[in-house]
Image (tube, rainbow, N blue to C red):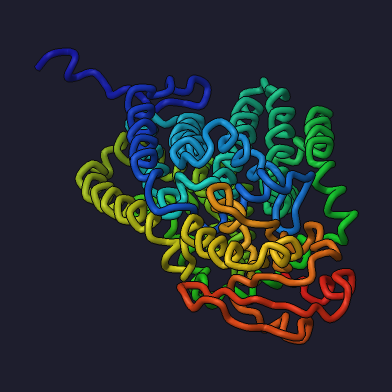
Amino acid sequence: MSAQLLSPQPPPPTRTEIPPLAKGPVYTIAGLAAAAQLAFSPFGGYWIDEVYMLAAGKYHPDWGYVDQPPLAPLIAAAMDWIAPGMLPVLRLPAVLATAAIVVLTAMLAREFGGDRRAQAVAGAAGATGLWTVLVGHWVTPYTFEPLLWLVLTWCLVRWVRLRDLGRPDDRLLLLFGVALGINMQMKFQVAILCVALLISVLLVGPRDILRRPMFWGGVGIAALIALPTVLWQAFNGWPQLQMGAIVADESPILSGGRGGTAVNLVLFAGVAGTALFLFGLWRLMRSPELRSYRFFAIATVLLYVFFIATAARPYYLIGLYGVSIAAGAVGFQRRRESRRTRFGWTAWPAFALSGAAAGYMMWASTTMTQMFGTADADSLARDASAAYTALPPEQQQHTAILGDSYIVAAMLEVGGAQHELPQVYSPHRGYGYFPPPTEEIDSVLVVGDPTDLRTRFSDVRQLTDGEIPIWLCTGKLGAWTEIWPQLKSL
């Protein structure tokens, strides 16, 4: 037997010299994920929240909105300005963000000492998460939020690793602050993440991060970036705080209540992702190798309990999957290195199932809008335009369009680019905080349910009975300054 075969196996990588990034497999997986999302992006029409982002950013640009910060609407408006009405162009930033999730998840595995195989496994799990692939080409805040959370966690993981080596790079704390500020302009849930991380650090460390001047400098940068949308919320009575009750009320329909939320908060990681997430969470709790990162496990559990207790959306934990998935992938690497398991035999079937489930979810994304009973933007605007142009010219000058929900109003505004329509209004959600109709408007075409307007107009009659009925309300009983506050609803 040769001396080479008799020589001992090389020791597992230590955190003093982490392996290089496995660019070949990781970038290939990210490229395949992007190509798949891009291939599905022309189909299915606008998703209900996506069309809301586009309408808000394009027709109602502001420093903030009732139910989200302004960054996603601005991205949607910018892409539509580049190529109006082109879904693949509109959705390109979302596709790139989904591909970047793959790379960041692999980079987290690398920080934990993951070799090429562990990085590829982590990246593949990130690419096949059920929620990730479902929303991966929609321009919505919850498409971009997981990537931004991954940036935050990567900054902390890398800082902790270097700190354990005695050479902390506090510039990462400034980058953390920049990412946090951008995240606050995308979605406010990151504030809850920060509270959970702070509690966890106070409980299990590393507490010295709180004594770093650059950490507080990063916090200051985050506050400056977030200031405009925070001020908007303050000047408008903090409507975002009221959204928690709305989300809880919608939970039984959208996620099966607290029970459905509890299950989906985990299963949305995908087939392989769920296994890696749970194993990685256990390792973060118990492994001496990962002792310095235990605060991530505590924060994950705290958020899991909090989101169930508040009947939150079942995708709110997605951004924290990457840390546990990376820890799980490296855990299987350690078992492979110690010859306690041959992970490959179980990995291939798991990832085959993950890929199949991911493909199904991408197909399902093209049918989701119809599942919610909403017509596409073009047909909705076309029907409303036909009803409007059928009115006498003199009446048209004093008639506005009113959608019974923010979804309908957004569909009408975006679809109205190709059809003749007057100004579109709605008292629902963010649209209720946009300027109300002027007093010269004495009649409205209501697209949807006119129930709330029956006591505000003397005559309400149905004009069409299509997929979404259209009603004409005439004989306004009072001024809009009195009517609108009574109609507004979150």
Left or right: 78 in relation to 286: right
- Considering the image in quadrants, where does the N terminus appear? top left
Residue farthest toward the left in the current orientation of the protein = 1
The reply to whether residue 269 is in sight is no
- The residue at 74%/44% (across/down) is 61
Q: Position of residue 98 (x, y in %)?
A: 47, 40
- The residue at 56%/60% (across/down) is 385
Residue 390 falls in which quadrant of the image? bottom right
Q: Position of residue 427 (x, y in %)?
A: 73, 68
The reply to whether residue 362 is in sight is yes
Q: How many marks?
A: 0
415 versus 221 height, above or below: below
Residue 166 falls in which quadrant of the image? top right
Q: Position of residue 154 (x, y in %)?
A: 58, 34
Front-most of 218 and 375? 375
Q: Position of residue 84 (x, y in %)?
A: 53, 38
Front-most of 229 and 181? 229
- Considering the image in quadrants, where does the C terminus appear? bottom right
Left or right: 352 in relation to 281: left
Front-most of 4 and 278? 278
374 versus 365 height, above or below: below
- The residue at 26%/43% (across/down) is 343
Left or right: 193 in relation to 157: right
